[in-house]
Image (cartoon, grey):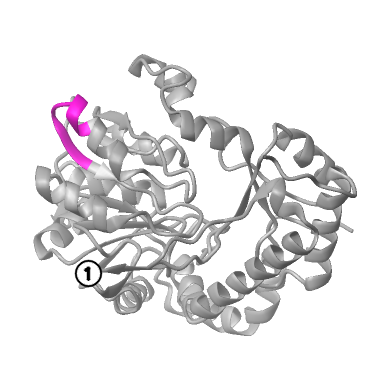
């Protein structure tokens, strides 16, 4: 049996008719960059996320970069973020000449630890922003993070690139990831729960002045054509991506529910096979949900690489997100971090493994995956004391 980590063909087969109509409308209109489809996507996403402004950009990476530009992050400024995330989170900081300050993660959710943010703030001056990442599909601990940020009068940019549609109970009200602070950022890379047919991103805010600035920055800093108030960049979403995303947005909540159902099947099969003694299942903290952009296990023994190799030999696509924390990446050596500085992130990088996850994943395939995991560990997995 061959099982890909993600099967976009099966998703496309279900919505092909809707996509074909949407694309024909784009071709008939001959609007290919920004334009009516992008405007409608922004309106529909603002309504879905319950924010005042949603501004489409060319990628999730650009969303992070422009968000920091809008907050006037300058060379030498420091920005606190997690070392256990995709490169773009920290890359956006360094592109502006600012300095990433890494804070270690919570061992259960893999999201940035509020206590470690506090620790970083005590150690570093000139911290001008905090970027928490809502990793794998579950929100970070935003109540604590917002409290810390307000105490220190520091803005927060939410990296919700993996968590569109996930919710967090903030002050007794359910809020979607990316909508709880000054700015939220999203990625529409094809593998995301809401994925385009190429790159795409979105920035959200409730602040009118920030929204106006962000709209300028995405078109070379121009308020009016050929009149440039700021030094911006070319980060315009194209109409084909917007059309695809508008179709998919109508299915997003159902797809997220189906991903959650697949996660529960994994949990049940792992427990039935007594594998919970050798694998740590995903943890969902109170007051949050999980949209399972990734279904990520943690091996409780030093066997992750061997397990991954075994599964791949048996046709099971599985990935490691992420094998080397950012503070140990070669390009960030100048920051002076060393192995042991972020022990929780380093342990996660050595032990996490993401199994295939998508709404169309069949029960048969999930059973095969867990059967092969059981085969790897042998007939009698043992509990670690």
Quarter of the rendering containing residue 143: bottom left
Quarter of the rendering containing residue 335: top left
Left or right? Give the position of 339 relative to 216.
right
Q: Quadrant of the N terminus?
A: bottom right
* Span highlighted in magenta in the image: 121-129
113 vs 165, nearest the viewer: 113
Left or right? Give the position of 354 relative to 227.
right
Q: Quadrant of the C terminus?
A: top right
Where does the image place residue 74, in percent across and percent down from the top left?
Answer: 16, 32
Where does the image place residue 204, in percent across and percent down from the top left?
Answer: 27, 63
Is residue 19 placed above or below 147 in the rendered structure? Answer: below
Left or right? Give the position of 303 relative to 367.
left
Tell me if residue 1 can be seen.
Answer: yes
Magenta residue check for 132? no
- Judging by the rendered image, the residue that carries numbered circle 1 is 171
- Local SS, label 1: loop
Q: Residue at x 51, y 54 (%)?
A: 136
């Amino acid at each position: 049996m061959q099982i890909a980590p993600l099967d976009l063909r099966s998703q496309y087969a279900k919505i092909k008719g809707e996509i074909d109509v949407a694309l024909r409308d784009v071709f008939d209109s001959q609007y290919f960059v920004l334009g009516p489809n992008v405007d409608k996507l922004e309106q529909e996403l603002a309504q879905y996320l319950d924010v005042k402004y949603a501004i489409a950009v060319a990628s999730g990476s650009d969303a992070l970069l422009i968000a920091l530009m809008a907050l006037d992050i300058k060379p030498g400024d420091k920005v606190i973020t997690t070392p256990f995330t995709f490169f773009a989170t920290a890359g956006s900081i360094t592109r502006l000449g600012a300095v990433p300050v890494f804070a270690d993660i919570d061992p259960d959710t893999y999201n940035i630890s509020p206590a470690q943010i506090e620790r970083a703030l005590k150690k570093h001056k000139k911290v001008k922003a905090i970027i928490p990442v809502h990793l794998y599909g579950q929100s970070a601990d935003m109540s604590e993070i917002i409290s810390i940020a307000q105490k220190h009068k520091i803005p927060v940019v939410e990296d919700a690139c993996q968590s569109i549609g996930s919710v967090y109970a903030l002050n007794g009200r359910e809020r979607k990831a990316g909508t709880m602070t000054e700015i939220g950022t999203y990625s529409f890379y094809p593998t995301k729960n809401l994925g385009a047919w190429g790159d795409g991103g979105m920035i959200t805010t409730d602040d009118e002045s920030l929204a106006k600035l962000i709209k300028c920055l995405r078109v070379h800093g121009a308020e009016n054509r050929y009149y440039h108030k700021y030094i911006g960049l070319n980060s315009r979403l194209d109409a084909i991506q917007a059309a695809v995303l508008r179709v998919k947005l109508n299915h997003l909540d159902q797809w997220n529910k189906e991903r959650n159902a697949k996660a529960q099947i994994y949990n049940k099969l792992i427990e039935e096979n007594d594998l919970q003694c050798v694998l740590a299942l995903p943890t969902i903290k109170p007051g949050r949900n999980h949209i399972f952009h990734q279904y990520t296990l943690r091996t409780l023994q030093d066997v992750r690489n061997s397990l991954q190799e075994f599964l791949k030999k048996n046709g099971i696509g599985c990935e490691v997100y992420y094998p080397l924390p950012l503070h140990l990446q070669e390009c960030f050596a100048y920051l002076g971090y060393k192995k042991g500085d972020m022990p929780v992130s380093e342990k996660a990088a050595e032990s996490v493994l993401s199994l295939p996850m998508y709404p169309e994943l069949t029960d048969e395939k999930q059973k095969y995956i867990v059967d092969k995991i059981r085969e790897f560990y042998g007939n009698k997995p043992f509990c670690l004391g």
